Image (cartoon, rainbow, N blue to C red):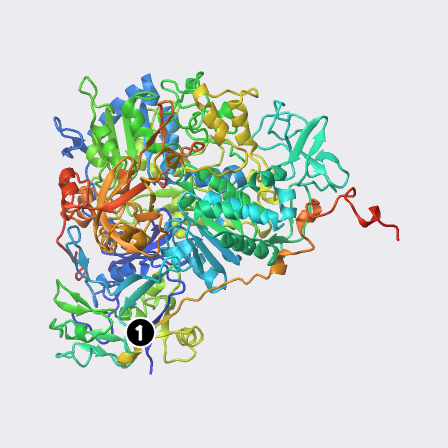
């Protein structure tokens, strides 16, 4: 059974927010998921509906500080806690591809689902009074009028660092499964038993190990210009003091 | 709003109404290829052009928010005139017709041009059409023209171009595809955007090691393998200490230095000699031309005598001291070694805050990687001395640096040091190192010159030379017989001799004071000079409204052309509404700053995908209309009749000289579009660009893609295509004879002009032919104990300069800025996270919110740049976060520094005039009720604040709810 998901590589995410606004741009114009309203867009405390947000954290103390950019959207859990709590059946998980969706017509805006979601991934649209969330751009994935390479979520296509991988995590040969397997992919808060489909790849450090003898080389160019220690002919030597 | 189980595609039912148009982004200066998806002629979606060489299909946060720029209520839609009787700056305007606007301008400008053309000044922001604006200014006859480079990053351009003949960003960059080790120093996150993000990510995934050197750890630095915090303005000390180590351990690429730099050239070291500090030359070349004659000398270590450089079979001594006909000489490299002897890692630790052991380790990492991981590509090429090489080799250590190095008054020498380090490692235009982008490399210095005398400015006559150029010696300065500046910004004067991008940041102050003279009309295009594009903002705003004894404004007439209402439009006497990037034709030209790739020239165009809003008119059209009305020679025929119908017509048919075959666009030239780079005008050129995604990419043969400073094939190709005039090799200037020529003049030697007495010492000090470290000028003048911290800014990736606060989506990411303070520094002052604080410099103060951070070194405080706005500006509500909570750091920065002799001098690099806005030193303290009350500050608001601006006639309404596209309706 297919489970579509995003795998986000924190090792290359620079926190540029391309995924955030490209998602907004695609989905607000989508007749299926949009519009995503913005309240007070030119006034005090503007706020709007975004399916995807980037949070930035500082980890550790100066100077051993890591700055981590952390994009977050609906994780499309395999055991989504938002679905059973929905009193109207508006929240549902698709069998065919595992995408968790909300039927706006059935949603009464009670927010139970957002209370149930341990990840804070749901977005209540204050203007439309319904719950909204990431659809994995379901309206792109099966659109036969799009070129095959474009049938991917908007955030994945936009991401300049290619930090967002997309595919079926149940297919062991998929790019996402391989990335999770080989690069230490992990899911968020597994203790909740939600089994999130989206995964994250951790930071990896590359270091250089230098050996002291790498600085001692026969081809040192200083030798050519005679700058390496070379005693002058007039300096004292054994020849001056002994004749054997 | 049903959500069907089977999703309905965007396209369904809309097929007929849906269009995709290709053009070029302009949400920042990166200029990616984009596809604009329209439904019923309205923008639904903008994504990256997958076939574009720059962004390869990706797009950033700004580019994805282009819709919100297009439909922003800050858009200006009608020409506006300051209401009769209204005070300048009050923002009270009345709409007028374009015909009226043109008539006003024509009358005023014609009068100026017929009397004294320099009384018209044209200064532009990040417009990327400098080839046209510069042409207009030159044709008008004014020397007073520049774009924003003087306060942006001219040190980066000049420092590297005067050293290696190229620089970063548009001019060249790190080859991260082949590099193994990458150092990013002082780089803002917009320089540049998507290509760098793509490259860093691939570099990391290929196992490269990435080291970020920056006082702050934000975007790019966040994913670095190592963050090395450094005190602002001390990068030069770090780089010089690394050079010290590289030399001491013999980790430099000797072969590269010998053949491709001036390391082996012999310098006259006889202090009594008039030629002291100059290279010894065998003969004087017959013609004075813009390249370096190959007539300098090496000391051949094999035959132990002086020979002409690059003599077959010779190998120069890089070290030692020799004598030629009684004159003491040393190789340039020896002088560099002598210079850096003092710059030990221990010394640098005290300056930079980086432990000496770390400096050593990083130097060894660079040196050993460069030496031991050599790349060899099977590409045969021939060098400028006729030697055939079977391969191209490279040392895979790459660097990228930007404003963190540049925006200091010691930036030029810091950047020279960087160029020299990159050269010592043998990484210039080689795989894995630094690579040029066409039309670079240029000769050192490039050939363009300004006039060198005020008589080049004459009524009704084009300027006799370029308004901006590259001085090679004091005779190239644009000064009068007494050595006084000709330009209003004092560019190319003895105060800032190599100010190759001008000093836009001093224009208003100089014009207001009448020093060097008063002007009449100042035309600003896309530059927010009453806010974030200026230093000392509070005072500069006063200068714009200050009047003389007759009640006339000291700057009599101010014209602002922009697409958006801003802090600056409020001060205009005449506002010209520009179009957005989706509404106009544009070119990213090789005559300006193209978007070339390492493998060859790339230029691009914009085409309108939407009609102009209201009465908006592209500024290009304004210039062509004005040029035609004023009968500027380039814009009219012999009978004085208008030559070009409009801007697209101009772009197709304009040639730099009649029949030159060189125009703004390099692609599809020739009558049928069959020629590239050079060829007759092609009437269908625009269509051919459109058919090719609006971009032209000329891929050089592999053998011309590397070593271009010295690659005979490339140099001849470049000459054939008139990219350069000469096919002569461009040797790297480890030792800068150009700088020495100025120093010589300051010493009263040589035949060239001499500086005025009061500037001789300044020239003597700063025109050092070798890089040296000095404390930034502001720090030399103020009490550092009183102002212990340095305040800098960073550029968020989701907001370009001041452009995007009117953008409903982007302002939700950065609605207001705070001051980030190292938590320990803050606590020592009793400042808790989120407290309101005062930040004070020797020049001004602001009130803002403090945020504790562990990602900033303790001596630095920083904020996101240009998020703070004046109330009501950009048509935001007067209580918007940007003005209520946000703040502008520029209030703390001075545009001038006091000199000991009572004169004032620009707060800029003394060589290039680069605005030193990262030099500002501050102290911080918690806000309390008493001080707040004394200063008239509100308890929950930033300070200073300004009376709210009201919307202008013709501006759209500020919606309270935005539902972009409900069922196709907005």
Give how far across and how far down residue B268 sits, in percent. 64, 29
Give how far across and how far down residue B642 sits, in percent. 34, 28
The chain letter under disc 1 is A
Return the residue nearer the eye: B620 or B31: B31
**Is B38 placed left or right of A161 in the picture?**
left
B94 is higher (above) or lower (below) than B63: above
Q: Is residue B1 visible?
A: yes
B591 is higher (above) or lower (below) than B464: below
B311 is higher (above) or lower (below) than A143: above
Return the residue nearer the eye: B59 or B840: B840
**Is B808 placed left or right of A228 in the picture?**
left
Task: Identify residue for label 1.
Answer: A188
Asked which secondary structure carries label 1, the reply is loop
Return the residue nearer the eye: B851 or B570: B851
Give how far across and how far down residue B412 sits, in percent. 46, 38
**Is B831 placed left or right of A128 in the picture?**
right
Give how far across and how far down residue B20 sits, in percent. 31, 56
On-image quarter of the N terminus of chain B: bottom left
B965 is higher (above) or lower (below) than B157: below
Give the residue furthest to the right: A244
On-image quarter of the C terminus of chain B: bottom left
Quadrant of the image occupied by residue B6: bottom left
Give the residue furthest to the front: A241
Q: Are there few (<14), some (14-19), or many (20+) residues within 10 Å of tag 1?
A: some
């Amino acid at each position: 059974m297919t489970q579509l998901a995003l795998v986000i590589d924190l090792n290359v995410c620079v926190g540029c927010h391309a995924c955030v606004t490209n998602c907004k741009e695609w989905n607000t114009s989508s007749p299926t998921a949009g519009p995503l309203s913005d309240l007070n867009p030119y006034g005090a405390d503007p706020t709007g509906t975004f399916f995807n947000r980037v949070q930035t954290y500082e980890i550790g103390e100066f100077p051993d500080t890591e700055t981590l950019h952390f994009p977050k959207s609906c994780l499309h859990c395999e055991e989504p806690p938002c679905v059973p709590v929905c009193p109207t059946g508006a929240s549902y998980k698709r069998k065919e591809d595992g995408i968790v969706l909300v039927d706006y017509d059935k949603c009464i805006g009670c927010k139970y689902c957002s209370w149930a979601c341990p990840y804070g991934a749901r977005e209540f649209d204050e203007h439309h009074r319904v719950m909204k969330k990431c659809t994995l751009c379901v309206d792109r994935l099966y659109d036969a009028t799009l070129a095959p390479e474009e049938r991917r979520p908007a955030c994945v296509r936009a991401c300049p660092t290619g930090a967002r991988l997309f595919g079926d995590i149940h297919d062991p040969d998929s790019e996402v499964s391989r990335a999770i397997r080989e690069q230490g992919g992990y899911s968020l808060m597994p203790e909740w038993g939600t089994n999130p489909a989206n995964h994250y790849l951790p930071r990896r450090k590359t270091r250089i190990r230098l050996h002291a003898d790498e600085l001692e080389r026969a081809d040192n160019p200083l030798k050519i210009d005679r700058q390496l220690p070379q005693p002058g002919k007039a300096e004292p030597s054994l020849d001056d003091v002994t004749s054997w | 709003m049903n959500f069907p189980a089977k999703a309905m595609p965007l396209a369904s039912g809309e097929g007929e109404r849906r269009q995709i148009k290709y053009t070029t982004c302009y949400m920042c200066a990166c200029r990616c290829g984009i596809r604009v998806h329209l439904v019923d002629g309205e923008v639904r979606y903008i994504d990256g052009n997958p076939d574009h060489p720059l962004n390869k299909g990706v797009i950033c946060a700004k580019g994805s928010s282009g819709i919100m720029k297009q439909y922003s209520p800050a858009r200006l839609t009608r020409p506006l005139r300051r209401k009769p009787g209204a005070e300048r700056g009050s923002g009270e305007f009345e709409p007028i017709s374009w015909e009226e606007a043109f008539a006003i301008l024509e009358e005023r400008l014609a009068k100026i041009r017929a009397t004294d053309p320099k009384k018209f000044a044209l200064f532009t922001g990040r417009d990327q059409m400098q080839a046209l604006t510069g042409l207009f200014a030159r044709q008008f006859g004014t020397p007073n023209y520049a774009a924003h480079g003087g306060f942006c990053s001219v040190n980066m351009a000049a420092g590297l171009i005067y050293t290696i003949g190229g620089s970063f960003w548009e001019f060249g960059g790190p080859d991260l595809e082949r590099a193994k080790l990458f150092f990013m120093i002082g780089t803002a996150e917009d320089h540049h955007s998507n290509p760098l993000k793509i490259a860093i990510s691939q570099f990391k995934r290929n196992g490269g090691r990435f080291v970020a050197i920056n006082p702050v750890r934000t975007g790019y630095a966040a994913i670095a393998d190592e963050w090395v915090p450094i005190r602002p303005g001390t990068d030069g000390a770090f780089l010089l200490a690394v050079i010290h180590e590289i030399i001491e351990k013999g980790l430099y690429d000797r072969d590269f230095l010998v053949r491709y730099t001036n390391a082996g050239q012999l310098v006259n070291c006889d202090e009594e000699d008039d030629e002291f500090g100059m290279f010894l030359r065998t003969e004087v070349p017959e013609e004075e031309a813009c390249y370096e004659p190959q007539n300098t000398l090496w000391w051949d270590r094999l035959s132990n005598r002086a020979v002409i450089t690059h003599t077959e079979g010779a190998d120069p001594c890089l070290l030692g001291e020799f004598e030629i006909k009684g004159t003491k000489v040393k190789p340039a490299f020896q002088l560099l070694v002598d210079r850096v002897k003092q710059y030990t890692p221990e010394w640098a630790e005290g300056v930079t805050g980086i432990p000496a052991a770390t400096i050593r380790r990083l130097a060894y990492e660079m040196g050993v990687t460069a030496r031991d991981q050599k790349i060899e590509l099977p590409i045969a090429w021939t060098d400028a001395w006729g030697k055939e090489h079977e391969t191209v080799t490279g040392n895979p250590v790459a660097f990228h640096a930007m404003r963190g190095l540049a925006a200091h008054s010691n930036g030029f020498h810091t950047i020279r040091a960087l160029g020299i380090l990159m050269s010592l490692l043998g990484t210039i235009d080689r795989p894995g190192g630094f690579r040029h982008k066409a039309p670079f490399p240029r000769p050192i210095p490039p050939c363009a010159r300004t006039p060198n005398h005020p008589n080049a400015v004459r009524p009704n006559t084009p300027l006799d030379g370029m308004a901006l150029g590259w001085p090679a010696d004091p005779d190239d300065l644009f000064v009068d017989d007494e050595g006084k500046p000709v330009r209003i910004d004092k560019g190319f004067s003895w105060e800032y001799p190599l100010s190759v991008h001008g000093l836009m940041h001093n224009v208003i102050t100089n014009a207001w004071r009448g020093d060097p003279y008063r002007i009449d009309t100042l035309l600003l295009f896309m530059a927010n000079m009453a806010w974030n594009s200026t230093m000392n903002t509070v005072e500069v705003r006063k200068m714009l409204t200050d009047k003389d004894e007759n009640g006339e404004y000291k700057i009599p007439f101010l014209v602002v052309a922009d697409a958006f209402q801003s802090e600056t439009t409020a001060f205009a006497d005449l506002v010209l509404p520009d179009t957005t990037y989706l509404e106009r034709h544009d070119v990213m030209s090789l005559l300006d700053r193209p978007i070339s790739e390492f493998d060859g020239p790339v230029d691009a165009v914009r085409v309108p995908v939407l009609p102009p809003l209201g009465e908006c008119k592209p500024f290009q059209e304004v210039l062509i209309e004005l040029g035609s009305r004023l009968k500027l020679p380039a814009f009219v025929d012999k009978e004085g009749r208008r030559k070009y119908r409009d801007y697209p017509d101009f772009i197709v048919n304009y040639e730099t000289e009649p029949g030159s075959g060189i125009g703004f666009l390099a692609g599809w030239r020739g009558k049928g579009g069959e020629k590239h780079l050079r060829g007759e005008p092609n009437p269908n050129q625009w269509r051919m660009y459109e058919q090719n995604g609006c971009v032209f990419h000329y891929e050089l043969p592999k053998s011309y893609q590397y070593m271009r400073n010295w690659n005979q094939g490339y140099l001849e190709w470049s000459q054939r295509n008139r990219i350069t005039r000469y096919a002569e090799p461009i040797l790297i200037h480890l030792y800068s004879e150009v700088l020495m020529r100025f120093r010589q003049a300051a010493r009263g030697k040589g035949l060239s002009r001499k500086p005025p007495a009061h500037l001789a010492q300044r020239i003597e000090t700063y025109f050092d032919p070798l890089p040296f470290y000095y404390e930034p000028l502001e720090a030399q003048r103020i009490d550092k104990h009183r102002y212990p911290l340095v305040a800098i800014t960073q550029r968020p990736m989701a907001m370009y300069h001041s452009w995007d606060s009117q953008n409903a989506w982007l302002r939700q990411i950065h609605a207001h800025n705070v001051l980030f303070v190292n938590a320990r520094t803050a606590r020592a002052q009793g400042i808790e996270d989120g407290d309101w604080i005062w930040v004070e410099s020797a020049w001004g103060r602001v009130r803002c919110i403090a945020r504790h951070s562990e990602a900033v070194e303790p001596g630095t405080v920083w904020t996101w740049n240009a998020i703070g706005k004046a109330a009501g500006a950009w048509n935001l509500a007067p209580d918007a976060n940007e003005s209520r909570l946000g703040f502008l750091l520029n209030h703390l920065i001075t545009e001038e520094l006091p000199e000991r002799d009572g004169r004032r001098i620009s707060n800029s690099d003394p060589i290039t005039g680069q605005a030193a806005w990262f030099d500002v030193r501050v102290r911080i303290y918690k806000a309390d009720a008493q001080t707040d009350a004394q200063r008239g500050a509100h308890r929950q608001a930033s300070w200073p604040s300004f009376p709210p601006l009201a919307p202008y006639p013709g501006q759209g309404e500020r919606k309270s709810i935005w539902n972009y596209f409900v069922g196709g309706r907005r």
